[in-house]
Image: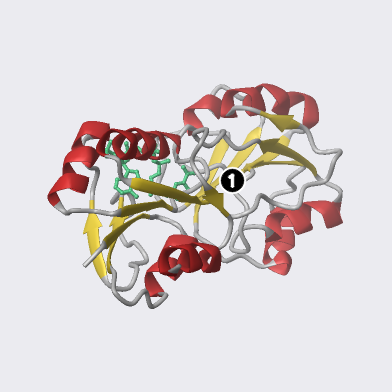
Amino acid sequence: MPSVLILGGTGEARRLASVPLPGYRVISSLAGRVADPALPAGEVRVGGFGGPAGLAQYLRDERIDVVVDATHPFAVQMSGNAAAACACTGTRLVVLRRPGYDLDPSWPRVDSLEQAAGLLPALGERAFITTGRQGIGHFRDLAIFCLVRCVEPPEPLPANFTVLLDRGPFTVEGEIRLLRRHRIDVLVTKDSGGAMTEAKLEAARSLGIAVVVVDRPPVTPGVPVLSTVDEVARLLLA
Ligand code: NAP
C-alpha cells in the first residue's frame, strides 16, 4: 500500500489527514512543540527526524511514496529538510501552503522579525506582537510597551512586555476589545494567512492601527505548491 507522510502542525494538515484517501496509508508528523497539540485523525508520529538525513532514513524505513509538506509557511527549516530528503531519496514532494492574508497596500512589509522590530518605535508606542514565541528575542530591546500573544510561554521578557497565552480562532469583536484594552497603536504579524488568525487584521483596519507585515520566506524552487486541501487530495487520488 502506498504511504503518504503529512508534515503538519497546521489546520490544513489536520484537515488533509481527515480526508478519506482510499488505498493509502497516511501518517501525520508533528514537531512536538506544544504541550497539548490538536491531534490529526489517524496515524500520528511526534518529534523531529534528526535533520534531512534523519528524515531521509525515515522515508526509506517507512517506505514513504509521497511527502506533503503542510507545515506553517514560516517553518523554513522543516520545509528545507523535506526538500533535501525527498531529493536524495527520490520521494515525491508536494507543498500545501494556504494563501497569505488579505493585506492593505499601505502596511509596511519586511523580510524578517529583526526588521519588524527596527520599524516599531517609529510607528507606535504600544505594540501588539503576534509573530509567535520563536524569535521573540528580536523585540526584547524595544523600550515601548509590547503585548505578546503566543500559544506556549516565551523566554522571560523585560518588564515592558505583557504576555498573553492564547490560540485561535479569534473573532474581530474580541480582537477589537483586546486592542482597545491595551491601547495598541501598532500590530506586528507574519503573513501566515488562514481564517483562525486573520480577525486581528480586520480589527486593526477598523481602528486605523498600523500593521507591520513579515513576508513569507520563499518555497524551494521546483517543488509543486498547492493552496488547498482539496487540490492535494485530488492530486493523490488521480
Ligand atoms: P522549523 O523551525 O522549520 O523546524 C525546526 C525543526 O523542528 C525541524 O528541523 C524538525 O526537526 C522539527 N520539525 C518541524 N516541523 C516538524 C514536523 N511537522 N514533524 C516533525 N518534526 C518537525 O519549524 P517551526 O517553525 O519551529 O515549527 C514547528 C512546528 O510548528 C511545525 O510543524 C509548524 O508547522 C508548526 N507551526 C509553526 C509556526 C511558525 O510560525 N513557524 C506557526 C504555527 C505552527 P528535525 O530537524 O529534527 O527533523
**Residue 24: quadrant of the picture:** bottom left
Query: Which residue is nearer to you in this view: 79 or 48?
Result: 79
Ligand 1's quadrant is top left
Residue 131 in the image: x percent, y percent?
56, 42
Query: Which residue is nearer to you in this view: 101 or 168?
Result: 101
- The amino acid at mark 1 is Thr
Q: Is residue 55 left or right of residue 22?
A: left
In the rendered image, the quadrant that contains the C terminus is bottom left
- At mark 1, the secondary structure is loop
Which residue occupies 78% across, 52% down? Answer: 204
Near mark 1 (Cα within 10 A), the count class, few <14, some 14-19 or many ≥20, is: some
Which residue occupies 52% across, 33% down? Answer: 221
Q: Is residue 172 left or right of residue 50?
A: right
Looking at the image, residue 38 lies above or below residue 198: below
In the rendered image, the quadrant that contains the N terminus is bottom left
**Residue 237: quadrant of the picture:** bottom left
Q: Circle 1 sits on which residue?
A: 130
